[in-house]
Amino acid sequence: MRIVKGISTLMLAITLFAAWTGVSLANSEEQKVQEAADVLAKIMQMPEKGIPPVLLRDARAVAVIPGVIKAAFVVGGRHGTGVLSTRAEDGRWSDPVFVSITGGSVGWQVGASSTDLVLVFKKMDDVEKLLNGKFTLGADAAVAAGPVGRKASAATDVRLRSGILSYSRSRGLFAGVSLDGAALLIDDDANAAYYGKSNLSAADILAGKAGEKPAATQNLKQALENYSKMK
Protein backbone atom coordinates (compact mmCIF):
# COMPACT_ATOMS: atom_id res chain seq x y z
CA MET A 1 0.00 0.00 0.00
CA ARG A 2 2.85 2.38 0.84
CA ILE A 3 4.44 1.73 -2.56
CA VAL A 4 1.15 2.46 -4.36
CA LYS A 5 0.77 5.70 -2.42
CA GLY A 6 4.38 6.52 -3.18
CA ILE A 7 3.86 6.04 -6.91
CA SER A 8 0.74 8.22 -6.86
CA THR A 9 2.62 10.90 -4.97
CA LEU A 10 5.51 10.63 -7.44
CA MET A 11 3.23 11.15 -10.44
CA LEU A 12 1.61 14.12 -8.72
CA ALA A 13 5.06 15.54 -7.95
CA ILE A 14 6.11 15.20 -11.59
CA THR A 15 2.96 16.98 -12.77
CA LEU A 16 3.29 19.80 -10.23
CA PHE A 17 6.99 20.20 -10.94
CA ALA A 18 6.34 20.42 -14.67
CA ALA A 19 3.70 23.09 -14.10
CA TRP A 20 5.98 25.05 -11.76
CA THR A 21 8.97 25.05 -14.11
CA GLY A 22 6.97 25.48 -17.31
CA VAL A 23 8.07 22.07 -18.65
CA SER A 24 5.40 20.62 -20.91
CA LEU A 25 4.45 16.98 -20.57
CA ALA A 26 2.71 17.05 -23.96
CA ASN A 27 5.07 18.89 -26.30
CA SER A 28 4.34 18.36 -29.96
CA GLU A 29 6.64 15.95 -31.76
CA GLU A 30 8.04 18.70 -33.99
CA GLN A 31 8.82 20.85 -30.96
CA LYS A 32 10.56 17.88 -29.34
CA VAL A 33 12.83 17.41 -32.37
CA GLN A 34 13.70 21.12 -32.36
CA GLU A 35 14.37 21.00 -28.62
CA ALA A 36 16.77 18.09 -29.19
CA ALA A 37 18.69 20.16 -31.75
CA ASP A 38 18.79 23.10 -29.35
CA VAL A 39 20.01 20.96 -26.44
CA LEU A 40 22.81 19.53 -28.56
CA ALA A 41 23.85 23.03 -29.65
CA LYS A 42 23.95 24.34 -26.08
CA ILE A 43 26.01 21.40 -24.89
CA MET A 44 28.52 21.62 -27.71
CA GLN A 45 28.96 25.35 -27.05
CA MET A 46 30.56 24.48 -23.71
CA PRO A 47 34.18 24.11 -24.94
CA GLU A 48 35.71 22.85 -21.70
CA LYS A 49 32.72 20.89 -20.45
CA GLY A 50 30.86 19.60 -23.50
CA ILE A 51 30.91 16.19 -25.17
CA PRO A 52 34.39 15.53 -26.60
CA PRO A 53 34.15 15.97 -30.40
CA VAL A 54 36.13 12.76 -30.91
CA LEU A 55 33.20 10.80 -29.45
CA LEU A 56 30.69 12.31 -31.86
CA ARG A 57 33.05 11.74 -34.78
CA ASP A 58 33.13 8.03 -33.93
CA ALA A 59 29.50 7.70 -32.80
CA ARG A 60 27.13 5.36 -34.62
CA ALA A 61 24.03 6.91 -33.05
CA VAL A 62 23.05 9.74 -30.72
CA ALA A 63 19.90 10.04 -28.61
CA VAL A 64 18.89 13.42 -27.20
CA ILE A 65 16.14 13.45 -24.57
CA PRO A 66 15.26 16.99 -23.46
CA GLY A 67 13.60 17.71 -20.14
CA VAL A 68 13.63 14.32 -18.46
CA ILE A 69 11.63 14.83 -15.28
CA LYS A 70 12.95 13.10 -12.18
CA ALA A 71 10.86 13.22 -9.03
CA ALA A 72 10.90 11.34 -5.76
CA PHE A 73 8.89 10.95 -2.60
CA VAL A 74 9.99 7.63 -1.06
CA VAL A 75 9.56 6.03 -4.50
CA GLY A 76 11.72 7.76 -7.11
CA GLY A 77 11.43 7.74 -10.86
CA ARG A 78 12.28 9.52 -14.07
CA HIS A 79 10.60 9.77 -17.44
CA GLY A 80 11.22 11.62 -20.67
CA THR A 81 10.86 11.46 -24.43
CA GLY A 82 13.31 12.42 -27.13
CA VAL A 83 14.79 11.33 -30.42
CA LEU A 84 17.55 9.09 -31.76
CA SER A 85 19.45 9.41 -35.03
CA THR A 86 21.91 6.92 -36.49
CA ARG A 87 24.98 7.56 -38.61
CA ALA A 88 25.53 5.73 -41.88
CA GLU A 89 28.89 4.56 -43.19
CA ASP A 90 29.07 7.65 -45.43
CA GLY A 91 28.74 9.91 -42.39
CA ARG A 92 25.17 11.03 -43.02
CA TRP A 93 22.73 11.16 -40.13
CA SER A 94 19.31 9.54 -40.35
CA ASP A 95 15.88 11.01 -39.81
CA PRO A 96 15.06 10.85 -36.09
CA VAL A 97 13.01 8.16 -34.38
CA PHE A 98 11.25 8.94 -31.14
CA VAL A 99 12.29 7.19 -27.93
CA SER A 100 11.24 7.28 -24.29
CA ILE A 101 13.26 6.61 -21.16
CA THR A 102 11.82 5.41 -17.85
CA GLY A 103 13.54 4.38 -14.65
CA GLY A 104 12.86 4.18 -10.96
CA SER A 105 14.26 3.50 -7.51
CA VAL A 106 12.99 2.92 -4.00
CA GLY A 107 14.39 4.54 -0.87
CA TRP A 108 14.10 7.64 1.24
CA GLN A 109 14.37 10.47 -1.26
CA VAL A 110 12.53 13.71 -1.81
CA GLY A 111 12.86 16.21 -4.63
CA ALA A 112 12.34 16.90 -8.31
CA SER A 113 14.39 18.09 -11.25
CA SER A 114 14.34 18.44 -15.03
CA THR A 115 17.39 17.24 -16.93
CA ASP A 116 18.48 16.99 -20.56
CA LEU A 117 20.03 13.63 -21.42
CA VAL A 118 22.36 12.68 -24.28
CA LEU A 119 23.32 9.09 -25.09
CA VAL A 120 26.23 8.44 -27.44
CA PHE A 121 26.08 4.97 -29.02
CA LYS A 122 29.46 3.54 -30.05
CA LYS A 123 28.06 0.38 -31.69
CA MET A 124 25.16 -0.30 -34.05
CA ASP A 125 24.57 -3.60 -32.26
CA ASP A 126 23.05 -1.69 -29.35
CA VAL A 127 20.79 0.28 -31.68
CA GLU A 128 19.59 -3.00 -33.20
CA LYS A 129 18.72 -4.28 -29.71
CA LEU A 130 16.70 -1.12 -29.09
CA LEU A 131 14.81 -1.58 -32.37
CA ASN A 132 13.95 -5.14 -31.40
CA GLY A 133 12.10 -4.23 -28.21
CA LYS A 134 12.53 -3.13 -24.61
CA PHE A 135 16.10 -2.07 -23.97
CA THR A 136 17.50 -1.70 -20.45
CA LEU A 137 20.61 0.38 -20.00
CA GLY A 138 23.25 -1.52 -18.08
CA ALA A 139 21.58 -4.89 -18.75
CA ASP A 140 21.10 -5.12 -22.52
CA ALA A 141 24.05 -2.79 -23.14
CA ALA A 142 26.87 -1.49 -20.98
CA VAL A 143 26.48 2.22 -20.25
CA ALA A 144 28.93 4.55 -18.53
CA ALA A 145 29.11 8.20 -17.62
CA GLY A 146 30.90 9.85 -20.52
CA PRO A 147 33.99 12.04 -20.25
CA VAL A 148 33.58 15.79 -20.72
CA GLY A 149 35.80 18.47 -22.20
CA ARG A 150 37.12 19.09 -25.68
CA LYS A 151 40.39 17.30 -24.94
CA ALA A 152 38.87 14.33 -23.14
CA SER A 153 38.62 10.87 -24.62
CA ALA A 154 37.01 7.54 -23.77
CA ALA A 155 40.37 5.87 -23.20
CA THR A 156 39.64 4.07 -19.94
CA ASP A 157 38.92 0.38 -19.55
CA VAL A 158 35.36 0.85 -18.27
CA ARG A 159 34.48 3.29 -21.03
CA LEU A 160 36.07 1.19 -23.74
CA ARG A 161 33.90 -1.72 -22.64
CA SER A 162 30.77 0.42 -22.59
CA GLY A 163 28.78 0.63 -25.79
CA ILE A 164 26.92 3.74 -24.65
CA LEU A 165 28.22 6.91 -23.00
CA SER A 166 25.69 9.05 -21.14
CA TYR A 167 25.53 12.74 -20.29
CA SER A 168 23.17 15.06 -18.44
CA ARG A 169 22.66 18.82 -18.33
CA SER A 170 20.69 20.40 -15.51
CA ARG A 171 20.59 24.04 -14.40
CA GLY A 172 23.71 24.88 -16.35
CA LEU A 173 25.71 21.92 -15.04
CA PHE A 174 26.90 19.26 -17.45
CA ALA A 175 28.51 15.92 -16.64
CA GLY A 176 28.49 12.20 -17.29
CA VAL A 177 25.68 10.35 -15.52
CA SER A 178 24.91 6.75 -14.55
CA LEU A 179 21.66 5.41 -16.03
CA ASP A 180 21.88 1.71 -15.14
CA GLY A 181 18.43 0.17 -14.97
CA ALA A 182 16.63 2.77 -17.06
CA ALA A 183 14.46 1.38 -19.86
CA LEU A 184 14.83 2.92 -23.33
CA LEU A 185 11.98 2.25 -25.77
CA ILE A 186 10.95 3.20 -29.29
CA ASP A 187 7.90 5.51 -29.16
CA ASP A 188 5.82 4.22 -32.09
CA ASP A 189 2.90 6.57 -31.39
CA ALA A 190 5.13 9.64 -31.59
CA ASN A 191 6.74 8.34 -34.79
CA ALA A 192 3.31 7.87 -36.38
CA ALA A 193 2.20 11.34 -35.33
CA TYR A 194 5.37 13.05 -36.55
CA TYR A 195 5.63 11.32 -39.92
CA GLY A 196 1.90 10.89 -40.50
CA LYS A 197 2.19 7.16 -41.18
CA SER A 198 0.90 4.59 -38.72
CA ASN A 199 2.58 1.62 -40.40
CA LEU A 200 6.09 3.10 -40.49
CA SER A 201 8.61 1.16 -38.41
CA ALA A 202 11.57 2.70 -36.63
CA ALA A 203 13.90 0.72 -38.91
CA ASP A 204 12.17 2.20 -41.97
CA ILE A 205 12.62 5.72 -40.60
CA LEU A 206 16.32 5.17 -39.97
CA ALA A 207 16.65 3.75 -43.49
CA GLY A 208 15.27 6.97 -44.99
CA LYS A 209 11.81 5.69 -45.92
CA ALA A 210 9.80 8.26 -43.97
CA GLY A 211 9.14 10.48 -46.97
CA GLU A 212 8.17 14.11 -46.32
CA LYS A 213 9.03 15.37 -42.87
CA PRO A 214 8.83 18.61 -40.86
CA ALA A 215 11.63 21.22 -41.05
CA ALA A 216 12.82 20.37 -37.53
CA THR A 217 14.25 17.12 -38.89
CA GLN A 218 16.79 18.93 -41.05
CA ASN A 219 17.73 21.22 -38.16
CA LEU A 220 18.60 18.23 -35.99
CA LYS A 221 20.47 16.41 -38.76
CA GLN A 222 22.45 19.55 -39.57
CA ALA A 223 23.40 19.99 -35.92
CA LEU A 224 24.59 16.39 -35.69
CA GLU A 225 26.56 16.76 -38.90
CA ASN A 226 28.22 19.98 -37.76
CA TYR A 227 29.20 18.74 -34.32
CA SER A 228 30.41 15.33 -35.52
CA LYS A 229 32.92 17.16 -37.76
CA MET A 230 34.35 19.32 -34.98
CA LYS A 231 38.03 18.96 -34.11
Image (cartoon, helix red, strand yellow):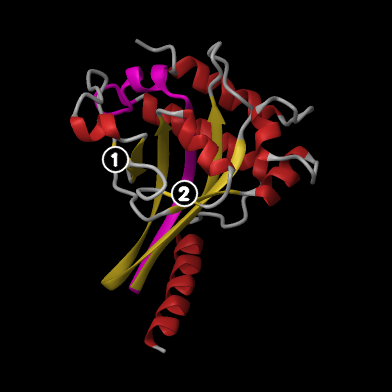
Is 138 left, or right, of 17 in this rendering? left
Residue for badge 1: 144
Residue 25 in the image: x percent, y percent? Answer: 57, 57
Is residue 176 toward the left or the right of residue 203 in the image? left
Crowding at mark 1 (Cα within 10 Å: few <14, some 14-19, many 20+): many
Q: Which residue is mark 2?
A: 67
Taking depth in this image into account, of 97 and 65 the one nearest to the observer is 97
Image quarter in which the C terminus is found: top left
For the question of whether residue 173 can be seen, the reply is no
Q: Which mark is residue 50?
A: none
Q: What is the three-letter code of the residue carrying label 2?
A: Gly
SS state under label 2: strand
Q: Is residue 69 magenta?
A: yes
Q: Is residue 137 above or below residue 228?
A: below
Seen at 35% across and 48% down, the residue is 138
User: What is the spatial separation of the Cα atoms under label 2 and label 1, in whole angstroms?
Assistant: 20 Å
Is residue 110 found inside the magenta-colored segment of the image? no
Q: Earlier in the sequence, mark 2 or mark 1?
A: 2
* Image location of residue 4, percent across then percent down: 45, 83
Q: Which residues are magenta?
A: 46-74
Q: Position of residue 13 (x, y in %)?
A: 43, 71
